[in-house]
């Protein structure tokens, strides 16, 4: 069952299945490693709930919820 | 000078932000660096002469930090233009040293593979090896080197480890351009369909369109054109013919730039996966313990914001209060020097020019140094340690709700002490338009120079001690209203600019939360030295000229008193314009003279009312004299609460500060933006005072 990054519980690892949409924000995040097949984990959310800090390819990156909704994930086998 | 430089080979230092590029550059370059701007933009360009171990000299230039060369930001555009020799006075580099964060290898290889596409001689500086080991990265630099086909040098730039080998390799590489054999072909030759076909088509057309000769760089050039943005003011700079060919190719292959970029990123990361596999790199991604622990406190939902407020309260306290004694000392020093010159020289026009024009102009510039040094000291510490990124993370929601970048918070906060260091601190804002909006609204934050004006006027027209609702006193409430008006004005004006001339999407959040590390004092020293020198050189000349101009306005014709000087006459001439605000010509003179700095209003009033130019805002006799002033042609008092409030509101919004204009000129590299700043603020100030005074009078307020 696929779901989007904004629904991923903090601390759970998942794999990116697809990145939807275009736009500058998404294409730049893809250059930083937000691509299909990458493993991803939410490290924490900011006090206002947005942005969130994600772990991606060994780095921590901030991403807004509006972009997180465009990232489709697949759960990893438990 | 230029001819010697032109003969030197050029070595460029490139890398991701936070990869330690600046530390590598500082270690290689030493203290003798020159800082300038790249032409037409405010991206800093540092360069130095590098002496290599074999005695050759090379010109070392610092490329702006970027994640990619696709030219979406000014930094990437500059990095690309340097590589292609498109920057005047900056030949194509003979060697690129790409600084890579070893603990972040996969992501860093994105930029490395783009350099390899260009076929430029390259050495990879594998920095932060210590953190990489901690994070469980297993790699063999030799195997990585064989895979990529370029030298890979492990370093810890902070401690200097491996830097000697960098110098040796650089010396070797600029003499022998031969590229080692490599296990993988460069990505540009392995493009997936249909990008590969589109690139081939465009590359041959670009070749045909220029000199016709075979150009081995035309494939990366074509890929870059296809990925770049062709529209809007962040567009890549391409000749019209090439833009047309690129558009045609995109249309023929039915591709959009956005699709192409996504496909290219996916494919490049797959290629990077193959590099890592071939080189046998394993990455266990252990959490960085120190960073984990610090973040669990510093980004904690409750403790995080509290510490954030504490950190910035300290920074604000620093600029606002700790700079005070140093500024007083500078003031006293220039006063003493001026007194000495006045005593030593006979009274003459030359002496006045020297003391009141030149010397006070220099003083007016130097006086800002304590605030600039304190702000950038804190800012350097915060940035180097990694906390600044966390601050932007915490502030993004709030700042983006008014259409600004999370990093705009610090410049705006600093501007409550003084807009000069505030505007200088906007350099951290990546997007040009967001940065301009921040610069334009920074002077609306109530700076410390406005305080004396507020104190004098509140004391003159209000019963400041009077209690309101039991707990507040009237003076405090008025002060609050003034600060609040400035903030409200800034929010509204920011929204207005974002919807008109600086229209743009919500700022892209491109924020990495790097591992925490100890700041380098050496780097901090370079930063403070740079900032001070640049401020003195660039803004100082403008401040000095305007001070001399203002001196001339207020002291010619010779022998006249202030009221009959050119400045005084200007005040008289202003009278009809400012009368609807409730002001008289004397206030007009105050407005003219306080263009030097807002607090000069107080001493000007002192001179006008015969108290002398030593008058302070607490001076009771000055307040008495002002209360006794009558509205011209009537026996009504001029300084009613309504007029006082109208005047203070004028100071809230008006750009009564030549130094702000000077520093905005320097930071935007044009007179257009400071001119706009002065114009909109003056119109805003006049309208606000007009509305308050006219509506207030109609409603029967005094």
Image (spheres, rainbow, N blue to C red):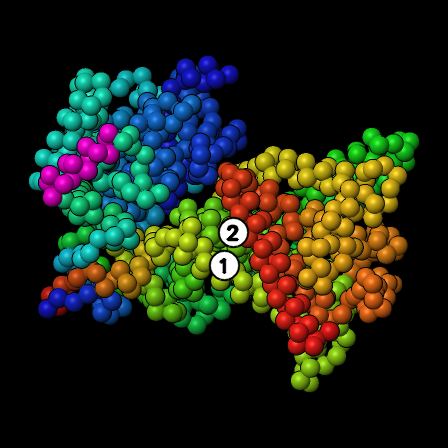
Q: Position of residue B74 (x, y in %)?
A: 37, 40
Residue A19 in magenta stretch: no
In the foreground, B61 or B182: B61
Q: Nearer the viewer, mark 1 or mark 2?
A: 1
From the viewer's perspective, tell me whether residue B51 is left or right of residue B151: right
CB atoms of marks 1 and 2 within 8 Å: yes
Q: Are marks 1 and 2 on the same chain?
A: yes
Q: Main secondary structure of the magenta part?
A: helix
Is any atom of residue B392 visible in this view?
no
Residue A12 left/right relative to B387: left
Residue at image coords 52%, 51%: B440
Circle 1 is placed at which residue position?
A: B493
Q: Where are the magenta residues, as a range?
A: B241-254
Q: Which residue is mark 2?
A: B440
Residue B688: give x, y in percent of width and height.
60, 63
Question: Element type at marker 1?
Answer: helix
Give B656 or B364, whichever is nearer the viewer: B656
Where residue B400 is drawn, which disc sits there? none
């Amino acid at each position: 069952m696929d779901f989007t990054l904004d629904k991923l519980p903090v601390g759970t690892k998942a794999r990116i299945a697809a990145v939807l949409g275009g736009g500058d924000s998404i294409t730049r995040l893809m250059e930083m490693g937000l691509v299909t097949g990458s493993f991803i984990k939410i490290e924490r959310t900011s006090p206002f709930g947005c942005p969130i800090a994600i772990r991606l390819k060994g780095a921590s990156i901030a991403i807004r919820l509006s972009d997180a909704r465009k990232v489709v994930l697949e759960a990893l086998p438990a | 000078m230029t001819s010697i430089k032109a003969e030197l080979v050029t070595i460029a230092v490139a890398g991701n932000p936070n990869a330690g590029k600046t530390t590598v550059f500082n270690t290689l370059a030493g203290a003798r660096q020159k800082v300038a701007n790249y032409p037409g933009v405010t991206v800093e360009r540092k360069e130095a002469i590098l002496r290599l171990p074999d005695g050759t000299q090379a010109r070392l230039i610092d490329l702006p930090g970027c994640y990619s060369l696709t030219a979406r930001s000014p930094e990437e555009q500059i990095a690309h233009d340097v590589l292609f020799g498109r920057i005047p006075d900056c030949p194509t580099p003979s060697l690129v040293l790409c600084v890579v964060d070893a603990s972040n290898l996969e992501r860093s290889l994105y930029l490395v593979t783009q350099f390899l596409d260009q076929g430029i001689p390259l050495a990879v500086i594998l920095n932060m090896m210590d953190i990489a080991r901690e994070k469980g990265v297993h790699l063999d630099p030799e195997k990585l080197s064989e895979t990529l086909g370029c030298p890979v040098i492990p370093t810890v730039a902070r401690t200097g480890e491996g830097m000697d080998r960098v110098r040796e390799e650089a010396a070797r590489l600029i003499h022998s351009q031969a590229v080692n054999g490599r296990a993988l072909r460069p990505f540009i030759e392995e493009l997936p369909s249909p990008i590969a076909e589109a690139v081939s088509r465009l590359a041959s057309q670009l070749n045909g369109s220029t000199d016709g000769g075979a150009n081995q760089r035309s494939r990366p050039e074509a890929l870059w054109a296809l990925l770049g943005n062709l529209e809007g003011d962040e567009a890549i700079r391409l000749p019209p013919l090439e833009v047309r060919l690129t558009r045609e190719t995109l249309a023929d292959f039915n591709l959009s730039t956005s699709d192409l970029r996504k496909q290219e990123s996916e494919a490049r990361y797959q290629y990077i996966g193959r590099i890592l596999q071939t080189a046998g790199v394993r990455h266990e991604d252990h959490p960085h313990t120190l960073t984990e622990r610090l973040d669990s406190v510093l980004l904690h939902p409750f403790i995080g914001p509290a510490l954030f407020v504490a950190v910035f309260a300290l920074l604000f306290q620093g600029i606002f209060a700790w700079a005070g004694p140093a500024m007083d000392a500078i003031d006293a020093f220039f006063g003493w020097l001026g007194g000495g010159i006045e005593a030593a020289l006979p009274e003459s026009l030359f002496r006045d020019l020297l003391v009141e024009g030149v010397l006070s102009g220099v003083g007016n510039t130097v006086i800002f140094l304590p605030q600039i040094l304190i702000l950038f000291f804190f800012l350097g510490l915060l940035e180097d340690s990694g906390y600044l990124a966390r601050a932007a993370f915490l502030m993004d929601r709030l700042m983006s709700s008014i259409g600004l970048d999370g990093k705009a918070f610090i410049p705006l906060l600093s501007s409550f002490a003084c807009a000069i260091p505030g505007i200088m601190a906007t350099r951290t804002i990546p997007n040009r338009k967001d940065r301009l909006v921040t610069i334009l609204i920074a002077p609306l934050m109530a700076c410390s120079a406005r305080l004396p004006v507020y104190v004098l006027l509140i004391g003159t027209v209000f019963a400041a001690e009077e209690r309101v609702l039991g707990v507040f006193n009237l003076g405090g409430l008025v002060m609050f209203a003034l600060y609040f008006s400035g903030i409200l004005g800034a929010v509204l004006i920011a929204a207005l600019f974002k919807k008109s001339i600086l229209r743009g999407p919500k700022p892209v959040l491109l924020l990495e939360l790097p591992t925490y590390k100890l700041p380098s004092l050496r780097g901090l020293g370079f930063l403070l030295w740079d900032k001070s020198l640049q401020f003195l050189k660039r803004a100082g000349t403008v401040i000095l000229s305007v001070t001399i101009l203002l001196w001339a306005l207020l002291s010619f014709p010779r022998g006249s008193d202030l009221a009959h000087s050119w400045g005084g006459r200007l005040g008289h001439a202003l009278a009809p314009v400012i009368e609807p605000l409730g002001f008289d010509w004397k206030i007009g003179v105050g407005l003219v003279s306080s263009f030097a700095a807002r607090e000069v209003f107080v001493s000007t009033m002192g001179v006008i009312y015969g108290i002398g130019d030593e008058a302070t805002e607490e001076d009771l006799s000055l307040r008495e004299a002002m209360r006794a002033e009558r509205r011209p042609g009537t026996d009504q008092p001029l300084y009613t609460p309504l007029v006082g409030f109208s005047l203070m509101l004028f100071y809230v919004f008006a750009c009564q500060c030549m130094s702000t204009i000077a520093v905005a000129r320097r930071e935007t590299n044009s007179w257009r933006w400071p001119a706009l700043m002065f114009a909109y603020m003056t119109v805003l100030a006049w309208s606000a005072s007009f509305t308050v005074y006219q509506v207030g009078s109609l409603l029967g307020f005094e």
